[in-house]
Image: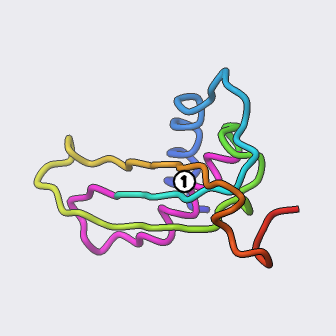
Amino acid sequence: MTKLGKDWFSKELPKIKSPIPSIEDPVMVGLVLFTTRMTQDLDNIFKASMDLLQKGGVLINDNQIVRITAEKRKVSTKVEECVQIFVHVLPQSSIHPRSRLA
């Protein structure tokens, strides 16, 4: 991870720590990156964000993620730049039997 990435991780981690228990079930995660730079790598932002969810205690392990969606949207100013993350708990019955978590 780059220094910029480490700095972001350190700044954002306290914001997502939650007093509620970690999610234990399989989840679908959606991410929307609002950026002024359309050349920014979406996959790098996604992976860092998923690591943040695990480190922050939202998920026990990022291997709980069984579905993902990600998109990048152009914004005009740096003030508008942000990352939105959505976590949806999936019922075990919606997961294919061979992909269920043990």
**Spot occupied by residue 61 in the image (x, y as percentages of width and height):** 76, 53
Which quarter of the picture shows residue 33? bottom left
Screen quadrant of the N terminus? bottom right
Q: Residue at x 70, y 75 (%)?
A: 96
Q: Is residue 38 magenta?
A: yes
Q: How many marks?
A: 1
Of residues 90 and 16, the one drawn nearer to the viewer in this rendering: 90
State the residue lying farthest toward the front. Answer: 93
At a point 70% along the width and 45% down the height, the residue shown is 59
Q: Is residue 73 left or right of residue 24?
A: left
- Tell which residue pokes out farthest to the left in this image: 76
Residue 97 image offset from top left, x and y in percent: 78, 74
- Comparing 15 with 37, the one in front is 15
Residue 74 falls within the magenta-colored stretch: no
Please report the bounds of the magenta region as a residue range.
33-54
- Residue 13 in the image: state x and y as whole percent: 59, 36
The residue at which mark 1 appears reads as 49
In the drawing, does residue 79 fall left or right of residue 65?
left
Disc 1 is placed on an element classified as: helix
Observer-nearest residue: 1 or 99? 99
Farthest right residue? Answer: 102
Specify how the rendered protein is coloured.
Answer: rainbow
Give the camera-side residue of 73 and 68. 68
